[in-house]
Image (cartoon, rainbow, N blue to C red):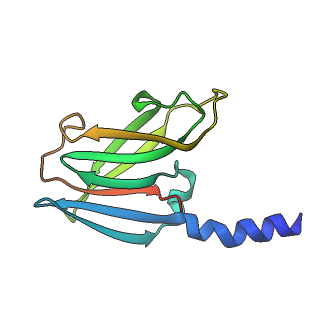
Amino acid sequence: MKRIFLASALIAPLLSGCVIYANDEGKTDVVRLSDAASTSLEAVGEPRVENGRLTVRVGSNGCTSLDSFEVQLTEAADGYTDVVLNRRAPDMCKALVAEGVELSWSFATLDLAPDARLRLINPQTL
């Protein structure tokens, strides 16, 4: 039991990094930050901003879709829009999808300006 606790104590800080994606004149910048508060959020993989879309890969048991997530947007004083993806309910289906599913939201759907600079608060999977 001590080994499991020790392993989780060592791994948890690695999973708590935030990723900032800034869409500024068609360029995408990536910066990793440490934020312990983000560890309770759904971890996302391969997050990116391109062609006016926010795209992420999330875990799935076969029933995860755009409707599975609530997207919270908060304008920050530094000019970024903070984005938090909250899973509405666990995916209780039985088809394990090892690579997860890719979800993508257009800036228009999120009511964002085409040149919006986004900061994704969810932790990134390794």
Q: Residue at x 18, y 48 (%)?
A: 51
- Marks counted in the figure total 0
Q: Nearer the viewer, residue 15 or 73?
A: 15
Residue 39's place in the image compared with 86, above or below, is: below
From the viewer's perspective, tell me whether residue 114 is left or right of residue 125. left
Q: Position of residue 52 (x, y in %)?
A: 18, 46
Q: Position of residue 38 (x, y in %)?
A: 50, 58
Residue 62's place in the image compared with 101, above or below, is: above
From the viewer's perspective, tell me whether residue 33 is left or right of residue 126. left
Q: Nearer the viewer, residue 18 or 46?
A: 46
Name the residue furthest right: 1
Q: Quadrant of the N terminus?
A: bottom right
From the viewer's perspective, tell me whether residue 76 is left or right of residue 26. right
Q: Nearer the viewer, residue 39 or 93?
A: 93
Q: Residue at x 81, y 64 (%)?
A: 4
Name the residue furthest front: 98
Q: Position of residue 11 (x, y in %)?
A: 66, 68
Q: Nearer the viewer, residue 23 or 110?
A: 23
Quadrant for residue 91, please give it.
top right
Q: Position of residue 78 (x, y in %)?
A: 21, 65
Quadrant for residue 126, please give it.
bottom right
Q: Residue at x 57, y 69 (%)?
A: 14
From the viewer's perspective, tell me whether residue 63 is left or right of residue 120. right
Name the residue furthest left: 25
Quadrant for residue 71, please give it.
top left
